[in-house]
Image: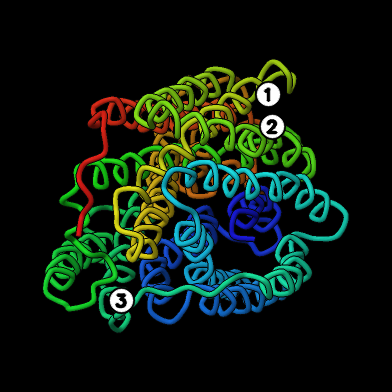
Amino acid sequence: MAFIDGSVVPIALSAIQRDLSADFATLQWIVNIYTLFLGALVLVGGAYGDRLGRRRVFLAGTILFVAASVACGLAPNAIALVAARAAQGVGAALMVPQSLALIAATFPEETRGRAIGTWAGASALTTALGPPLGGFLMDTLSWRAVFLVNLPIGLVVLWLSRGVPESRAANAGPADLLGGLLATGGLGALTIALVYLPDRTITDPLVWGGFLVFAVAAPAFIAWEARTAAPMMPLRLFRDRIFSGVNLLTLLLYGALGGALFVVPYTLTGLRGYTGAEAGLALLPLALAIGLLTRFFGSIGDRVGTRLPMAIGAMVVAVSIGWLGATEAAGSYWTGLFGPILGIGIGMSIAIAPLTTTVMNAVDQTESGAASGINNAAARIAGLLAVALTGALMVGVFSSELLSLPLTPGVDPGVLSSIAERADRLLQAADGMPGADASRSAVEQAFSAAFRAAMVLNALLAIAAAILAISLPHKPAARVT
């Protein structure tokens, strides 16, 4: 369900924007508020699982997630939807790290790579039909059905969980609530600043205030984690070069993936004329590649090591995102979209299991919940920051490009200036504006430039991940105790 919500919601953004009259910043919050609470509190969720029982916390998170999904489906306005998405994030933060922690607590190290590969593959296979199913529900019913579909899925999850064995860490202390609050507050403030920076100045209180709160909260969080008896993010784990390096790699690689996949569905449904179901089907090769290949590459990592597969996978993702920027998802599906989308899926399938296995093997089994939480947090925070940065870049490039285009006959420069002032709505910036029809071509050209800039940014993130992977030590360092 957590993966479905990450892949389906972007497909529904254009419909949500029309139905709830939301600007682009609000659309970013619909995606980001979920990622914010999941990314920040997944550390607390992992710690709670170690202390209270991983199965118990998994069930609690599932129940909260399903209830919040129903609230999303019934939301009367954009503010209510954002609030319900926040509750979904809290539920996911309790639910997500437990599944991986339960595997790490059950399987020995020599077969853990294959088990994690199976976990990742099963996650991808069960969500492979998520985007096309969500698009179909959006087209035939409403975008609200995209959220309500979690109710029957959640009931099945609760029924299946009856046979999951319980596990917990011995002598675990209390959960680190203050650390969670500092992380959530700091990341939330940074997100606010990044989301609103494009259409406001740096002197705006919302922008500089967000950066200021983050500048205070981030060192306060690190200081607290260093002194508290039961930190949700044990800093000693980062003394291991492999553990710290692979988590940074996770931040870069999942940032590239999250930033690209935030933009593509919006482009397909808002500019290329795809229906919701068609946009979902267009992304299906990515999920199928991960689902069918991840277990295979996980077993290869068990035999040959994880460093090279991580580097190769990240580089394949980088090339594929760059390819997508070159095609702009234009033309026929087979020439403009299929190849790069499949390439991204293949690259991620090469990297995912070796990456996760490396993280879990770098810590003692008793801290598998904390390690899983940290790695999940890195992946979610990566998406959070990538969506904010990608959105900020796109709005800035869109506005700048729109004002710099040469005027064509029938286009009023005053209309272009007015559209640029509403750049936070991107493709819908001209809707309802007198004389905007003649400017539609200019709007599409400006958006194309913004799309290309977004793909370049995210391709560079994946390249940085590949460079980092190849620089990691060949052999695991000594375990951290």
Q: Which residue is mark 2?
A: 285
Which mark, residue 181? 3
Secondary element type, mark 1: helix
Q: Nearer the viewer, mark 2 or mark 1?
A: 2
Determine the CA span between mark 2 and mark 1: 7 Å
Label 2 SS: helix
Rendered position, 149 above or below 441: below
Q: Amino acid at mark 1?
A: Phe
Q: Is residue 248 above or below residue 173?
A: above
- The foreground one among 226 and 411 is 226
Image point (42%, 22%), residue name: 312
Distance from the alpha carbon under mark 3 to that under mark 2:
38 Å
Whole-angstrom CA distance, mark 3 to mark 1, is: 42 Å
Q: Amino acid at mark 2?
A: Pro
Is 162 placed left or right of 392 in the picture?
A: right
Using the rendered view, name the quadrant where residue 237 is placed: bottom left
In the picture provided, is 187 more to the left or to the right than 80?
left
Residue at 36% across / 66% down in the picture?
43
Residue 470: x %, y % from top left: 29, 25
| Circle nearer the N terminus (3, 1) | 3
Q: Are marks 3 and 1 in contact (CB under 8 Å)?
A: no
Q: Is residue 129 visible?
A: yes
